[in-house]
Amino acid sequence: MTTKQDTLYSQSLFNKIAIFAGGRRNQLLQKSSFMSEKNVAFTYLTLALSIIFWGGSFIATKIALQSFSPFCLIFLRFSCASVFFLLLLSRTGFPPLTRKNLKNLALLAIFQPGLYFTFETIGLQYTTATKTSLIIATIPLVVVVMSVLFLKERIRPINIAGICISLAGVSLLVFGGQPEGVASGMLFGDLLIGGAVLSAAIYMLMARSLGQTITPVQITGVQAIFGALIFLPLFLYDLPALQWQEVTTDSIIAVIGLTVFATIAAFLCYNYALTQIPAARAAVFINAIPVVTAFGAWLLLGETLTMVQFIGGAVVLFAVYLANHSGPSAAST
């Protein structure tokens, strides 16, 4: 027969167990929150690195083009990267080679690097680099529209404001060093650069969708392999005109840097980020590339920045913060 003392003892024991269980649950929640914060920090670190590598790639490309034609340079980048990824994937595993996966990966490579680099390279022959930079800066806006239409992603008004402000910052950055402020370009070239914008936006959405079933390493590896195959005919067309005896050491170093950092590391980092955060939020970081390029050119190539350009760079960085600001009501996928 249970006594009052036994009852009190049992209640005390259950209270202790409940307190212990609650404390353990709080510890697990705190640990989970800590791991989540670490994952978010790592995601944005990889995103920042990809933008730094791509921003520096314009400087390296400027050096490499002193010895190589555009399509020769692009092919060398992706062919060297494809060798690396063939070796890597042979150890870590290729993506499942189903008909659906091959179709999606081939489409991904056609849009990026295929169509994007083709449109951008040819378009630059008809329009100015300044106008090209401003048109390329509209990629986040295109991604926002396509994300809402196809991925059903939702963004807050403050994120939209960040994207719009970033365009103003890029305008200050690219126009601030020119006395006339507005550069002209042929309509055909502008349309080609618009094709590059559309190609990049489609790539970003497809990479995020594929990232649910295929790892970032596999996506990046297939991009490099298919990219090398896409640019092989163009490389063979330009090859007879290439003067190998005039290739400089600086150009070779630039090609190596473009391969390792801009082609391999940057795509790895960016594809990983696309699997962790909404495509529209990741895309706005593209607007920080001109900031990296401008400051890198100032440090390494001796190009100067005006006060207006400095202000423009600061505006872009502030806009990136706004576009990635999240609150209690923010929805995520």
Image (cartoon, rainbow, N blue to C red):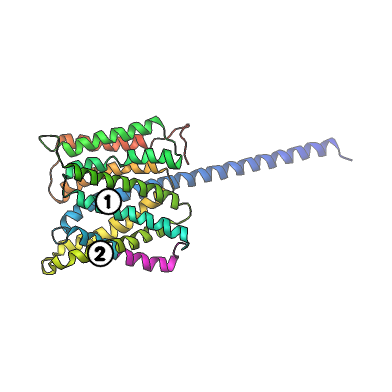
Residue nearest the viewer, comparing 177 with 131 = 131
Q: Residues within 10 Å of mark 1 (few under 14, many from 20)?
A: many
Could you say where residue 184 lies in the image, as x and y percent from the top left?
14, 39
Relative image position of residue 20 (x, y in whole percent): 65, 42
Residue displayed at 39% across by 41% down: 146
In the picture of the structure, the residue carrying the numbered disc 2 is 233
- Which tag, 2 or 1, sits closer to the chain's start? 1
Magenta span of residues: 80-95
Taking the spot 42% from the left edge, 55% from the top edge, the residue there is 104
Residue type (three-letter) at the residue carrying disc 2: Pro
Comparing 143 with 169, the one in front is 143
2 vs 202, left or right, is right
Mark pair 2, 1: CA separation: 25 Å
Whether 4 is among the magenta residues is no
Q: Amino acid at mark 1?
A: Trp
Please tell me the numbered disc located at residue 35.
none
Q: Judge by depth and name the residue closer to the eye, 241 or 187.
A: 187
Q: Which residue is mark 1?
A: 54
**Percent from the top left, x then y, of residue 11?**
76, 37
Q: Would you place residue 46 above or below residue 256 in this image?
A: above
